[in-house]
Amino acid sequence: MTSFVSTQELLAMMGDHLWQSTLFAAAVVAVAMLLKRHSAALRYWVWFVASAKFLVPIAALVAIGGYSSWRSVDVVPYREGPVLIDTVGQPFTGESIALRTPRPRAAADTTVMNWLPTALFALWAAGAVFFLLRSLLHWYRIHTIARDAVPMTEGREVEILRAVERAVGSAAPLPLRCTDSFLEPGIFGIVRPVLLWPRAIGERLTDEQLQAVVAHELCHLRRGDNRAALFHLVVQTVFWFHPLVWWIGAQLITERERACDEEVIRRGSEREAYAESILKTCQFFVESPLACVSGVTGSDLKKRIEEIMTKDTVSTPGALKRALLAAAGVIVFIAPVAVGALNPPPQTRDVAAPGTLPAFEEVSVRPNVSSGPGGRGGGQMQPGRFVATNLTLKNIIRRAYAVPGSTGPSGGIDLLEQQVVGGPEWVATDKFDIVATTPGQTPGAEMRLMIQRMLAERFKLTPHWEKRELPVYVLSMARGDGSLGPGLRRTSDEECQKAKAAGPPPMPQAQPGGPPPQLGLPNCGAISFGPGQLIARGAPMEWLAQALVNVPVITGIDRPVLDRTGLKGNFGFELKFTPAQAVNPDPDRPHLVTALTEQLGLKLEATQAAVDVLVIDSVERPTAN
């Protein structure tokens, strides 16, 4: 199940990346059309950014920003994203993928999904290898020609090359190698480029035409067209199946040739001589089969000649427009990093490995097919066994991963409904009967670990902890001077020691025909509760916050309560209020929030804060026994 989910995630993220890159390329088409009257060099780099986008997933940029964030943030707010962004930007992934949550599938569907990713990967790999080998073969052929070429140190071509280099201000002389092949003149190499020069070309071109061809090649060298073409060659090899990648490649070749044409004309070459040099080169020589060997031919020859002969001026964008275009290109890649840096990924931590946890002696798990919503709670943790009757798996999980505390069953506070997320729908609807026995009396904290191991072994449950921003209540001091309310008093250690030595206090007795007995004073170091009452003796404030959550039927609290009172030590109190579900509320008893303020000097405020959430990564229905 886990491997299936991982494959599903990978395919979904790849689908999102391809979709985002396609949308970005569509935007580039619009930008290129707006820049139609501007220089080809500008349009070339616009297309190059579209090519680069294919190798840079937005999700990766966001992750880089998140994990390199300078911020110390405990949580990323957990909320639904805008529907438009989720639908248009990430059509293949959704909340279920983000939470790594599987969904029930038919057996045949699961079988197909098991071999389909492998088949798709094999098809992609075969295509990538084919195009890689084809490129290597073309490179080897040109490399062989370059290896057999003869260095030229003097002659007409060398003199023209050096003259043009001086005119354009080249830093170092470009090596010139003469070949007997009919490959067009071109710059070969990335680190140590050379100009491959067919021997027969000098017989067919005049000095002026040779000068124009050399100027064209030096323009490719200064622009770094070989490096850019190699980069896009990698893009084409990886995304060989995407037609748009090949179209972008054609646009890059077209615009780079036009850019060099414009540069040659701008530097004073005579239009007719330059156009004739290109026509003769195309007539007698072969275009390079490798895009990262910049030559003279390429692109739509007829259209190039028309532009060389008729295009008088090229609109140059102003400083502001150039700055805006450069900023837009940078923002495309920097913005996702900034988003990640400002919104670091949520803190996560793994649960304990099942093999390291204690285990039950015997476990019986059976589905409960009775109608109705099922029982409440998360099961009974008895001295020698755990019993869950007519309970959903989600309720059992809430108890198994309960927060340690003294006010809940066996010293734990069950997770709230919203603190367990993910998993298929049946986790919250299907009911089970579970009986698990232990070798002897087992403390509640240890039995919760046993339940966790049982869930991992029988339900194949794989969860992880994650910090998320959820609605909470904050318990804090109500008075500006920090004074306590009349019903809240400190309990010293000496008082608790005397109380423990005296033994448990007597239980109140009901009088015949009288009202139900009131709660008695609890043992020191405990909190007792009843309808509309919470009584503590020698308890820290954290226990009060836990008690408010642990008895929602009485308090009406349905979200975590965080202790922010700052009070240290133990306290005693008797809090009286109107029960949350009282049919005939006592008019003399205030609401819980008011009672906390008036009686204890505390306030309870609703807000949002980082809370531990258990995320279900994978789970399976168990086999009954």
Image (cartoon, rainbow, N blue to C red):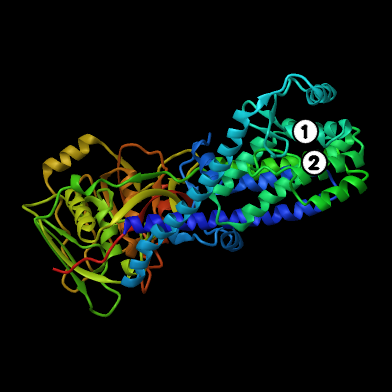
Closer to the camera in the image, 291 or 52: 291
Tell me the SS state at disc 1: helix
Image height of 259 relative to 561, above or below: above
- The image shows residue 372, relative to residue 181, as above or below, that is below
Q: Say which amino acid is labelled 2.
A: Ala
- For the residues marked 1 and 2, what is the alpha-carbon distance in whole angstroms? 9 Å
Q: In the image, residue 415 lies at what x, y percent?
A: 32, 56
Quarter of the figure with residue 498: top left
Q: Nearer the viewer, residue 217 or 482?
A: 217
In the image, 419: left or right of 272? left
Q: Which residue corresponds to mark 1?
A: 219
Which is more N-terminal, label 2 or label 1?
Answer: 1
The answer, for residue 143, to whether it is visible in the render is yes
The quarter in which the C terminus is drawn is bottom left
The residue that disc 2 covers is 259
Residue 604 visible in rendering: no
Label 1 close to label 2 by CB (< 8 Å): yes
Q: Measuring 38% from the left and 47% from the top, which residue is drawn there?
A: 486
Q: Along the horizontal axis of the image, is 338 left or right of 277?
A: left
Query: Dot 2: few (<14), some (14–19), or many (≥20) neighbours within 10 Å?
Result: many
Residue 457 is situated, as x and y percent measured from the top left of the image, at 20, 56
- The amino acid pointed to by label 1 is Cys
Q: Is residue 573 left or right of residue 360?
A: right
Say which quarter of the image contains residue 286.
top right
